Amino acid sequence: MSEAGSPGPDPRLAIALDVDGLDMACSIADAVRPWMGVAKVGQELFAAAGPAAIGAMVDRGFAVFADLKFYDIPTTVGRAAAKVGRAGARWLTVPTVGGPDMLRAGVEGLADGSGGTAQVLGVTILTSDQDRTRSVLKKRVALARDSGCGGVICSAADIEVVKEVAPELVLVVPGIRRPGSSHNDQASVATPAAAIMAGASILVIGRTLTAEAQALTAESPQLGETLAEMAERARMLAADISYL
């Protein structure tokens, strides 16, 4: 038991560390660690701290989701993916729109760097994209599956289609909001319980938890109180799906 009343971090919950400094990312991660088992290191944090951001989260016991969306010629993607694997990431995103050669290069590079323990997540259609069709989604999911990806990034609204095409894939779902929360720039959102019941494997939780902290710095006098409130919301999120 990591905290009174908590059975330990839920491997279905990923905290999105979309901040521009490693100190703040570590503070947020430490606050939610009792309830959330995955840390998402995105482009903003990676640009600020590099592979050290992945290592810091691995050291804290998180499985790391490197949301870097590598998109380049296959050789470059493969080499970069290998470095991410060596840094300790468990998952790495690569856009399916890049095609099979790029996806396979990412899959092979990541496997080589991680000793076969990490997997690529194919990005299907971004949740901020208003132009989405069932046929495009099916093609991109099939491409991810056939290229060796271990999972895909998809919206909650797309889970049914993804499971129809490739039920064996891990489904990582962003755009998760607690009831009553703002949608921000997400075109497709869902509550934690609804997404899990629909078949999501991992829920990416960002601004619904971190919005207040993102406006602060490590020197802000209210940071401690804000982190405590964030921790309580993380506990409530874990409770929302504990029975599922």
Image (cartoon, grey):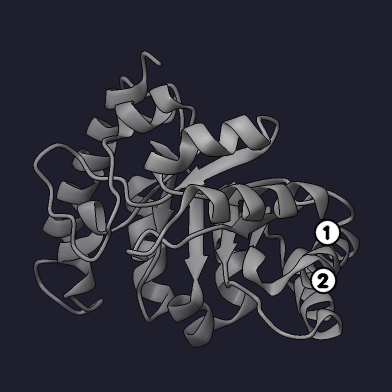
Q: In the picture provided, is 39 more to the left or to the right than 30?
A: right
x and y, in percent, of residue 118 in the image: 76, 52
| Mark 2 in CB contact with mark 1 (< 8 angstroms) | no
x and y, in percent, of residue 154 in the image: 49, 49
Position above or below: 20 against 1: below
Question: SS at mark 1?
Answer: helix
Mark 2 vs 1, N-terminal side: 2
Residue matched to label 1 = 114
Disc 2 marks a residue whose amino acid type is: Ala
Residue matched to label 2 = 82
Question: SS at mark 2?
Answer: helix
**Image quarter of residue 233:** top left
Disc 1 marks a residue whose amino acid type is: Ser
Query: Which residue is pictured at 51% across the width and 66% down the height?
Result: 41
Nearest to the observer: residue 232 or residue 179? 179
Instruction: Report if residue 59 is visible in the image.
Output: no
x and y, in percent, of residue 24 in the image: 34, 71
Nearest to the observer: residue 71 or residue 209? 71
Instruction: Report if residue 125 is visible in the image.
Output: yes
Q: In the picture provided, is 131 more to the left or to the right than 114?
A: left
Viewport quadrant of the N terminus: top left
Distance between the Cα atoms at labels 2 and 1?
Answer: 7 Å
Position above or below: 84 against 210: below
x and y, in percent, of residue 114 in the image: 83, 59
